[in-house]
Amino acid sequence: MEFMKPKAARVMPPMMSEYRHSVNIICEESVQYHIVSHLCAALRREGISVFVDSCGSQETKPFSVEQNQAVTDGARVSVVVISNKAESYGPWVVKFLKAIKRRRNSDHAVVPVFYGVDPLTQVYGWSHGRLEAEKLTSHQSRISSNRILTDSELVEEVVRDVYEKLNIAERVGIYSRLLEIENMLYEQPMGIQSIGIWGMPGIGKTTLAKAVFDHMSTDYDACCFIEHFDEAFHKEGLHRLFQERIGVLLKKELGIKNSYIMTPSLYRDKLCHKRILIVLDDVHDSLAAESLLRKFDWFGPGSLIIITSTDKQVFSFCQINQIYKVQGLNWHEALQLFSQNAFGKNVPEQNDRELSVKVIDYVNGNPLALSIYGQELKGKKSGMEAAFLELKKCPPQLIQDALKNAYIALDDNEKNIFLDIACFFRGENVNYVVQMLEGCRYFPRVGIDVLVDKCLVTISENTVQTNDLIRDICQEIFIGEIESCTRMWEFNNIRCLLEDDELEASGGSRETPNCDLVAEDIESILMDTSNMKFDVKHDAFKNMLSLRFLKIYNSSGSKDVLGLKTPKGLDSLPCELRLLHWENYPLQTLPQRFDFEHLIDLRMPYSHLQRFGARAKNVKMLKRIMLCHSKELVECDILRYAQNIELVDLQGCTRLQTFPDTSELQHLRVVNLSGCTEIKSIRGSPPNIEELHLQGTRIRELPISNVVQSPKAKLDRKKLLNLLENFQDVDHIDLEIVTNLAKVASDNQDFSKLVLLNMKDCSQLRSLPDMVHLESLQVLLLSGCSDLEEINGFPRNLRKLYLGGIAIREVPQLPQSLEFLNAHY
């Protein structure tokens, strides 16, 4: 039988001499010295007193409800172990459960443990149905459980459950994290051990550190927990902090009077044989922490140093290599913690569940926020929903303070990057965010790394993320810090700036703005027009000389909304714009005085634009053009000048008849012309294109050579590669030869980097050339090409092929790499 890892014998210090909590265990005699003995030992290791009431037959040792009730007056949890020999005491256990229910002490919890019996069947009054009815969480041994569960794992499960029931609203979800830290320490070599506890503000670092401290303090000769380390260090100083925190403990351990002055050498001699546990909590000043840690070299083998911080770089500076990142509570833990604070129970009533889920999703498992929001909403039964909305607008000060310290520690570059991410770029690709912020002359590669290390943003699946709570707190801090607004997201503030006062405005009365509005200072505008609309004055952007990001969008998803109207037109747009995102743009052209010099990203879906780019020649910064579903667009010649363009999305531009030659655009990787029903041909192939979407166009052929690269072209390509590989061994290189070889090699690489080709529903397409040389192509969609009768060859590395509904009678040899084939109809 497997049991928990052995630990060093614990000697209770005076502060721990009395148990903080007590637990009552009810069991049958046959398991008292078996599974129950290990359960008792594990509970006592956590500083929990245990009273065991075992019973045999009713005649020899009957179970006493009265006696047990007396015991549970001082206990908050009763563990009932149901074994396969429970026929004599099973009915009494049921009586005990009923007695507990009759008591006024509703905090008393019952934990059923099924050892060798199946709770799915009726067992002396205990059944799965009864457990659900009583809202009891049970634990089952491997004999009765579908999953493999050893005795040691069963003990660990029960102890975790009991531990968290004894620490209601204090340490929900802590026990499992405590065990993870303990396991990390077991893997460290002997000597002075160390571990860093890292996480965002309010995530529970201090609570976890205290739990580890309480859990392990009996293993050490002396223990010290320095809360708010930075504050204590700067208030007391290095020498005094060491003397009064560490020195006092050591003197007490050695039996030396506190007035006795110890020299550094005496400290070193005495400490080198002592196992010391030190916790430095909430460290931001890594230099201060490192200066104190130098003295910890005097500690004896087996000592443990724990540091908690929101800044990952602190651990690196202090040479702490093993870091435990504290994650948010899981859904069930978060529900329990919020419910305890808001409703005084572990599980909310059904009619409170919807709001509970909203709060949990909003705070993303942050324990501090869950507790505070629960306390703020407590007792507001009828107006709880409205109160929650108010709290989102202005988060409680305690939560703001937790984040503000981390924000204040940022430099100006990092603050600007953080604010732009929180307001504009949540969920965006990290490379795109870097590109946009570099265009604003920031240093985002370093800045984003700092924000990740400080737990203010995260990188998940190559996207930049920050949760709603952090965004709202960030905006609240930002408003309180700055006299005039540089970033704007409040609808009424934006309306005050843009609305034409001379025209009758729709959408309700105007409210007083929340901050001083100075057009020259505004750097970004984020406006959702899904619920409100108004008329924009013709010179609305005239004085916004610093505006970098403009995003006007509709969050409802409905494309029937007209959005903002500009009855007098628009004189200008700011020349400093890096992002121009305006859904349902109402005019047929962009303002004549708009300069594209700094523009990186142009997104104007569902616009009324007709011709685009005739005057736009200074577009060297432009990377993306997205004019999808602009149904009046007939011409897009801006591509003639946008030499650094990477993505073109003209999907659904049903009046667009031509698409310019893009063969010179070295950076173009994605082209989407799907739904452009008037497009009949495309000219040239961008050398680095990876995705080409032509679904529903009237295209008749692709500009792909029917002939595989000639032997001469292959030979020239090989010569070029050999020349470049042996560059260091060549004394002189003829640049003209290299240029000619490169040109020949590139001219014979039609779509050589193409990964996805979408030609679905191209009803005019009749044949496709041999594509065997398209070695990068992995996905080919030809479904719905009803007139397609001839395919001369498939790419040799193709993985997915869609041929549904085409007119072909004979399919060429399929490549061996193919993983998915759709040939319906």
Image: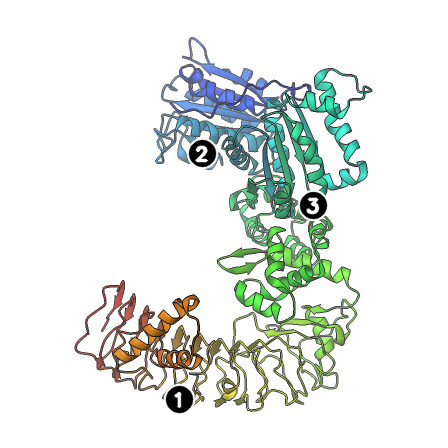
Residue 803's spot in the image, x, y percent?
Answer: 26, 73
Please say if the residues under marks 3 and 2 sit with CB atoms less than 8 Å apart: no
In the visual, does 669 lie left or right of 487?
A: left
Residue ID for mark 2: 131
Residue 476's spot in the image, x, y percent?
Answer: 71, 59
Residue ID for mark 1: 678
Q: Secondary structure at mark 3?
A: loop
Residue ID for mark 3: 284
Sequence-earlier tag: 3 or 2: 2
Residue sitting at x 69%, y 86%: 538
- Residue furthest to the right: 259
Q: Amino acid at mark 2?
A: Leu
Residue 259's spot in the image, x, y percent?
Answer: 82, 20
Local packing at callout 2 (Cα closer than 10 Å; few below 14, some 14-19, many 20+) is some
Q: Nearer the viewer, residue 505 or 154?
A: 154
Q: Amino acid at mark 3?
A: His
Sequence-earlier tag: 3 or 1: 3
Q: Quadrant of residue 697?
A: bottom left
Residue 245's spot in the image, x, y percent?
Answer: 74, 29
Q: Secondary structure at mark 1?
A: loop
Local packing at callout 1 (Cα closer than 10 Å; few below 14, some 14-19, many 20+) is some
Q: CA distance from mark 3 to mark 1?
A: 61 Å
- Residue furthest to the top: 60
Q: Nearer the viewer, mark 3 or mark 1?
A: 3
